[in-house]
Amino acid sequence: MNESELKDLFVSSIESGHIFDSKNRNLPFTNPNNKIRIKSEGYFGQFDLVIAILNKENKGKTYQNSDEVEAYYNVLMRTGQLAEIARAEKCRIDRISFYPVELKSSCDTLDVRLPNQIMNGILTFGKSMVVLDKKHINRASLRFLRLLPATIIGYTGTKDFFRILSVFDRNINTGMFNLSKRRFAKTLGENGIVEGIERIYGRLRTLERINQKLVFNELYNSNPGFLKEEIEFLRQFSSIKTAMTYRKQILSFVKESENDKISNYL
């Protein structure tokens, strides 16, 4: 079947509750208590489908377990993406999660584009899902696909029935931006800075968070949704008078390294 046919079957499967999991994992997109909104060719055609999950459970205001902390970071980093649908659906912003879906029909091939498509979903929404036609479901392909950070769903070949083949249901929010506190303190100490390390670390973490918002929300010109404290932080940050010029320092460093041997770096 082609992509359009696979897409229609998968949407029908979601609406009919025909996605099965032999391990009985209660995933958000298979939970009948959740509302589901599906957009075809979502985010300017970047994804074949984007599934929005609206969790109707009455969550508390505090974040205690790992899943709740993960939801907190997802809201913090993707405020602009979540706010619009929260207003439209009149629900709390922390009850929304997105699943970008990449469809692979029998007319498609599994090649090097797939990891890039999965990473595109992760950078945009924190997670990714791949739906395979029956042709692609074999031992060799699944051995490879289960290593990827995506939930994999396969068509059974019968009506609109699909099954979950592997699950990666973790939001990826800060992995590539993490700043190791211990390594940072050690680096400052080696450069003669021993006081105010906690304050410096905290301010750099704030900058990291702001940078993440810009990366995650402005991929598609979304509003980053800055908090008042972040706006005030940027205002104070802009008042720093020190101007750093690197040209002379770099030229000096290059000149110092003229007589270095490659063995010096091994």
Image (tube, rainbow, N blue to C red):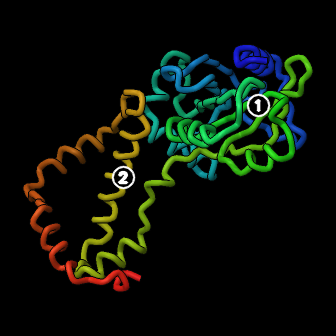
Q: Amino acid at mark 2?
A: Glu
Vertical side of 247 occupied by 121: above or below: above
Q: Position of residue 238 (x, y in %)?
A: 15, 47
Asked if residue 86 shows in the view, the reply is no
Q: Is residue 5 left or right of residue 223?
A: right
Question: Where residue 241 sits in the image (x, y, percent)?
Answer: 7, 55
Image quadrant of residue 48? Answer: top right
The type of residue carrying mark 1 is Leu
Q: Residues within 10 Å of mark 1 (few under 14, many from 20)?
A: many
Is disc 2 surrounded by few (<14), some (14 to 19) or many (20+) residues within 10 Å?
some
Q: Is residue 65 above or below residue 91?
A: below
Q: Secondary structure at mark 1?
A: strand
| Res 132 label | 1
Q: Is residue 64 left or right of residue 249?
A: right
For residue 71, which quarter of the picture? top right
Q: Residue at x 34, y 38 (%)?
A: 227
Distance from label 1 to label 2 (Cα)? Answer: 36 Å
For marks 1 and 2 on the same chain, the one whose residue lies earlier in the sequence: 1
Picture quarter with the N terminus? top right
Please give left or right for residue 251 compared with residue 196 in the image: left
The residue where tag 2 is placed is 208
Which one is nearer the viewer's eye here, 234 or 60?
234
User: Residue 64: horizontal and vertical position, in percent?
Assistant: 59, 51
In-image side of 45 versus 257 (left or right): right
Query: Mark 1 or 2, which is nearer the eye?
Result: 1
Q: Position of residue 256 (x, y in %)?
A: 17, 79
